[in-house]
Every structure is written in C-alpha cells, then in structure tokens.
Image (cartoon, rainbow, N blue to C red):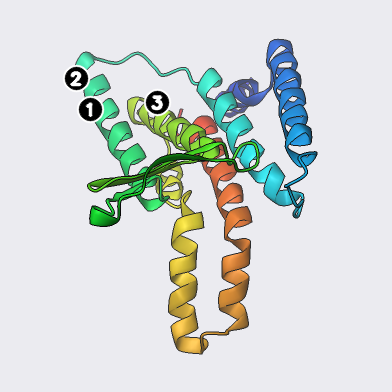
Amino acid sequence: MSYDRIAIRDRLARVSPTPETLLWGAILVTAELLALLLYLVQPNVTPTAIRYYVYPFIWINVGLWALFRIDPPAASRRRRYAASALAVGYFAVLAYAGGLVGSGLGEMATGLRIAPLPPGQGPALIYGGEAIRLVLFPYRIVGYVALAALVYATVLDVAGSAIGGVLGLFSCVSCTWPVIASLVGGVAGGSSAVASAALSESYGLSTVIFVVTVGLLYWRPFGGE
C-alpha cells in the first residue's frame, strides 16, 4: 500500500465515529431536543425559524466532538508552553471579536443577570460592569474553547495546516459580518438589499465557517504527514 493511501486511511480513521461516540452523541441530541421542547412549550415563548434553534446545537455538538477527539502529539515543555500561549491568545481574540468580552459601561453599569434565551444560546450570563462587559453564550464558549484546543494541537503538530488557523479567525463572522455589511451599506445605501442579506445570513454563515474550521484543524488535510 502506498504512503499516500496509508495517510488517507489514517485521516479517515481519525474522523470516523466510534460506537461509543455515536451512543453519547445520541444521548446528547436527545437531551437537546428535550430541552428545546420544554423551552418552546412555555406560554411566553414565540417560536421563530427552526434554524435559529439548530445553529447553537451544531456549535455545541461539533465543539464537544472535537474536544473529546483531540489527541495532541508529544512535545517538549517549551513547545507546549508556546502552544498554550498561542491557544489562549487565539481564544481571547475570538472572545473579544465575537462579543463575549468587551469594554465596561462605566457609570451605566447594569450588574449581573441571566438572559433566558433558547437552549444553546442561553441561559446566557450577562454582566455589565464599569470596567468589563461579559455576554456569555454557551454555544460560543464551547465553540471557541474547541477552536483554541484545536489550535493548540495544530501548533504542536509540525504537519499542521496553516489554512485552518487562518479560517478560525473568521469563525466570529457573526460579529464581523455586520461590520462588513455596514461598509457595503455606506456605499450602496443604508437600505441596500446586499447589506440586509449580509446581516440576515451572518448566523448561518458563521456556523458553516465554524464547522469547516473545526474539520480543517482536526483533520488537517493539507498537512504533509
């Protein structure tokens, strides 16, 4: 068997789910469906498009899958420290760009509260302090932690793909895309159909890019191993 075929077989084996993974996956999806059902039957809840309930679960499920499947290669202590620093910095950039962390509200500080959002998006912990502002959506926390862990493993792997890390920076497109849409609106007009389309599709686009990024960082198809 050629080296290329062995490499392809090994990479396919890395992404093939084991029976145990399928079992826990089924349990997780069942729990999520139950939580969503309990949320929707509340009298004060007005249902919206189904995709907005599905997107957070995609982030959570893919993120958890990646976290449980990551197997960082052996490396020296110095390389592990360097990889850890890069991963922490990577998470900090995503957290800030994705709106999890922001500058404080000064004298307009509102304190701590919990927003009863749909499962996956919430319950979200929101803190508006004088020096710092936090908006902790569960699906983004899981997703960004998974990306940071994948970056850690990729840095340790000398055959890691640089393209995955680059794409990972755009996993927070749900935050950056409206900025781009605003720039387009400034050129084409505030009521531009292009700007409206960009804003409405940002959540779905960020989810697609997140899944693709996780796949690239985990599988690393462009590596040379």
Q: Quadrant of residue 86?
A: top left
Is the residue marked by circle 3 packed among few (<14), some (14-19), or many (20+) residues within 10 Å? many
The amino acid type found where label 2 is placed reads: Arg
Task: Name the residue tied to disc 2.
Answer: 78
Helix, strand or loop at mark 3: helix
Would residue 79 be found to the left or right of residue 184 on screen?
left
Disc 1/disc 3 C-alpha distance (Å) = 11 Å
- The image shows residue 154, relative to residue 203, as above or below, that is above
In this figure, which residue is indicated by the disc labeled 3?
Answer: 153
Q: 164 or 30: which is nearer to us?
A: 30
Judge left or right: residue 109 versus residue 172. left
Q: Which mark is residue 82?
A: 1
Disc 1 residue type?
Ala
Q: Position of residue 207 (x, y in %)?
A: 59, 48
Say what secondary structure mark 2 lies in: helix
> From where the camera sits, is residue 221 visible?
no
Query: Of the residues under marks 3 and 2, which one precedes in the sequence?
Result: 2
